Image (spheres, rainbow, N blue to C red):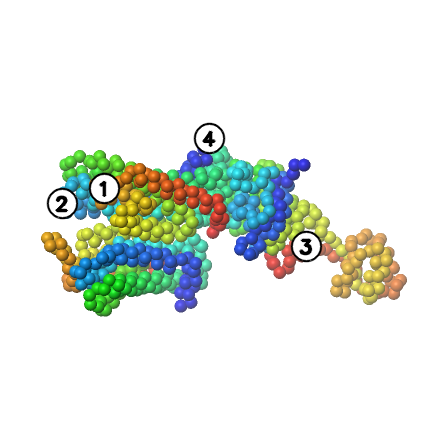
Amino acid sequence: MKTSYGKAVHAERLKLRRSPVWLAFIALPIISAFFGTCNYVLNIEILKKEWFSLWTQHSLFLCYFFMPALIGTYCSYLWRLEHTRHNWNSFLTSPLPLWALYFGKLTQAVCMTVLGNAWIFFLYYICGKIAGLASPFPKEAMSWFFFGTVGAVAICCVQLFFSLIIRSFAIPIGIAMAGGIFGLLITNKGWGLRYPYSLYSVGMRANNPNLEIDMSAHLVNSLTYFFLFTALSILWLRKHEISAN
Amino acid sequence: MPTQNLVETHNLTKEYGKVRCVDSVNMQVPSGAVYGFLGPNGAGKSTTLKMLLGLAKPTAGDITLFGMPVKEKTRMKLLKQTGSLIESPSYYGHLTGEENLQIIQTLKGCSEKDIDKVLKIVRLEDARKKLVNHYSLGMKQRLGLAAALLGFPKLLILDEPTNGLDPAGIQEMRELICTLPSEYGITVIVSSHLLSEIDQMADHVGIIRKGGLVYQNTLESLHSHAKQQIALRVSHPAIALDLLRQDGITAAQEEDYLLLPMMDDAYVANLCKQLVSQNISLYRIEKREKSLEDIFLSLTGKESSL
Amino acid sequence: MITLLMEWKKIKRKKVGLTMCALMGIQFAWHFWAARNPSEKELLQGWLGNLQTQPLLCAIMMPTVMSVLASRLADIEHKGNTYKQLKTLRTAGTLYHVKVLCGFLFILAMTAANYLFLLALGYLHGYVGDPDPKAYLLSFALQSACCLSLYLLQLDLSLLFFNQMIPLVVGLCGSMLGVILMYLKTYSFLPWGGFLSSAIVMMDWNRDTKVVTYYYRDFSSIEFLALTMVAVWIIVFYTVGRILFTRKES
C-alpha cells in the first residue's frame, strides 16, 4: 500500500513521461560552463585563484539570472499540466489530501533542482580538470552545493505558488527573472539572506567563493520561505475554486 | 430513520457575485438509480454537480453523499467512492490513453487490472497506445468515462457525457449507463439538456430551470403527466362548460376548445347526447396527447430552447 | 485593423501590459542603481554612458522578456484551442500578421518608456550638457528593431509548440548567450547579439588608470555587416514563421 504522498509523487512522475523538459537543466549549465571556462582560460593572468576563480566565472550569471528563471520554468510546466486540458477537475477530484497533491509537485521540482545543481558542480569539476587546474578540488564546494540547494528549494516553493495562482506560463518566469536580477541589488545591499531569490546565489557563493555566510540564518530563512509559500499554496488549493478552462 | 438516498442536497445555493446560479436545490438521488439531471444550457447543472464533488463551494445549504456531509474532512473518503466526468474530459495530451489511466489509477489506488476492464468497457483497447492529442473528441470523451469508471466507484457523476459522440457512440453510451446499476452496483447521476436522452436512460429525473429544481420524481411519474385529454368544439362553449360543471367534470377552455380529462367511450357518448339535447351543436371531438416534450418545455420555459 | 482590435480585446484582462511594465521596472531599477551617486566624471559623460549601458542590459534581459511577451500572446490560442475557429474567420497570414503587429506595439511602447526613463534619469542627476537627439533616436530605433527580431523568433516558437517550456527555455538560453557575447565581442551575427552589434556608444576602460571613457563607435565594415544582420533576422523569422504558421494544421 502506498501512502497518499507516494501516490501523488508516482502520479506526477507518470505525467512527466515523454516530455524532455529536463533537457533545459542539462543545456543551460553547459552553455554557462563552456563560456565560463573559456573566459577563465583567456583571462588567466588576472584570474589567479585557480578553482575559486573558475567558480566566479561559472557561477555569476547562472546563479543570479538563469537558475531562478529555469526553476520558474519548471514550476510553470508542472502546474501547466493542470492549467490546460480541463485537468483541474480530475486533479482536484482525486481522492488524496490537497497537501499530498501539492507535495507531489514540489517533490518533482526539488528533484529536478537538486539534479540540476549537482550537474553544475559536476561540470565545474570537469571543466577545472580540462583547464588543467593543478590544485585539489576545493572542499568548500560541498558547502556551496548544500546551501545553494537549500536556497533553490525556497525558490521552488515561491515559484510553485506563483505558477499555481497565475495561469499564464510565461508571467511567473518573468517574475523569476525579475526576482533573480533584483536579488543582485539586494545582495549588494547585504540583505541577501532575507530575500528568497538571493538565498540560492548567496548559498552558492556566486562570484564570491570567499564569502562567509551566516549558515543558521540561511537555513532558518530558507525554511521560513519553504513553510510560508507551501502554506499559501495549500491554502489556495483549499479555498480557491479553480475552474478548469 | 436512515436515509435511502445516496445523494441529498438541502437548499443548495450558489452565487457568483450577485448572480444566483443554483437556488435552493433539494436534490434526492436514490441508491441504485440512474438520475437524469435535465435542464437547458446554463441552468446550473454543472455548478450543482461541481458542488457535489467539492469543486465548487456552496454559498448556502448542505450536501450529503453516502449519508456523510460534504466537508473538507470527509472529502477524501467521499471522492474515493466517486467517479466523475465534469464539463470536458480531462487529459494529458502528450501521454497515451493508457498512461492517462495509469495516473488516475495511481491516484485512486485501485488495481491495475481495472485499466484493461474500463478500456474494454469504453472500447478504447485499440487506441490505448496512441497519444491522446491524436484522439478524436469522442475518444477523449470515452477516455474520460473510462477514467471515471476506474475503481468502479459507488457513485458516478457524468456531466453531458454524450457531448461530442457520434450517434452510434451516443447509443452505446446510453446502453452502458443503463447497465451500470445492475452490473456494477453504481448509482449514476447524468446531466443532459436533451429530454429524449434522459428519457432513454434514466429512471429518476430532476429538472432544473434558472438554478431552481422545478421537478423531481421518477421518470414514470413524469410520463403520467403526459396525460391524454378529450377536446370538444361546440357551438356554445359557455353553456356547455356550465353543464359539465353540474356533472362534476372539471373542464378548461382553451381557444375554441373545451379540454376534459380522459374518459371512457360510454361516458363520451352519454355526454354528447346530453349536449345535443340542450341544443348545443357538436363540431369536433378529439383525443389530445400532451407529450413529454411539452411538459419539459412548460417546466423549463419555452424561451430556453433546447 | 478589425483583426488588430480583436487581438487587443483578446488580451484584455491578461495583464500583458502590466507584466511588461514590471519587467521594465526591473530594468529601471538597475539603471537607477547603477547610476546612483555619480562622480563628476560620470556626470560629464552621463548622456553617452546611458547609451552604452542600455544595450548591455537589453542583451541580458530582452531575450527572456520577448519570450514572455510572445508566449503570452500565443498561448491564449493554445489554451482556448481557438486556432480552428480563427482560421475560419481570417486567413492564417492575417492572424500571424496581427500577432506580430500587436507585439511590435508593445515593443515600441516599452522602448519608448525605456528612453524616456533614461532622459529623466539624466536630468534628475544633472548630467552635463544635453542629450544628442540624433543618437538617442537612433538607439531607440535600433533597440526596437533588435527586440522585434527576437520577438519574431519567440513568436514562431510559441505558436508552433503547444509546450511553452520550449520557447521559454530558448529565451533563457538567448539571455545567457547575450551575456556571453558581451564578454566575447561587441558584435556577432547571432540574433541575440543584435543589441551589442547595434550599440552606438562604446566604452574604453584603461586598466592602469582605471578611467572610463565613452566614445561614439566607428563601425568597421564587419561590424556594420553584423548590424545589418538584425534586419536579415527580422526578415528570416517573419517569413519562416508566416509560412510555418500558415501550413500548421491544428
Q: Residues within 10 Å of mark 3 (few under 14, many from 20)?
A: some
Q: Nearer the viewer, mark 2 or mark 1?
A: 1
Using the rendered view, name the quadrant where residue C237 is placed: bottom left
Label 1 vs 4, first from the N-terminus: 4
Decide if residue C158 is on the left or right side of residue A89.
left
**Which residue is farthest top?**
A1
Q: In terms of secondary structure, where does tag 4 sit?
A: loop
Is any atom of residue C114 visible in this view? yes
User: Which residue is denoted by mark 2 in the rendering?
Assistant: A44
Q: In terms of secondary structure, where does tag 2 sit?
A: loop
User: Which residue is denoted by mark 4 in the rendering?
Assistant: A1
Decide if residue B156 is on the left or right side of residue C230.
right
**Circle 1 chain:** A
Callout 3 amino acid? Ile
Residue B295 is tagged as 3
Is any atom of residue A119 visible in this view? no
Residue depicted at 62% across the width and 60% down the height: B303
Q: Nearer the viewer, mark 4 or mark 2?
A: 2
- Which quarter of the figure is the C terminus of chain C placed in? bottom left
Residue depicted at 74% across the width and 54% down the height: B228
Callout 1 amino acid? Leu
* Alpha carbons under labels 2 and 1: distance apart: 22 Å
User: Which residue is denoted by mark 1 in the rendering?
Assistant: A211
Q: Nearer the viewer, mark 3 or mark 4?
A: 4
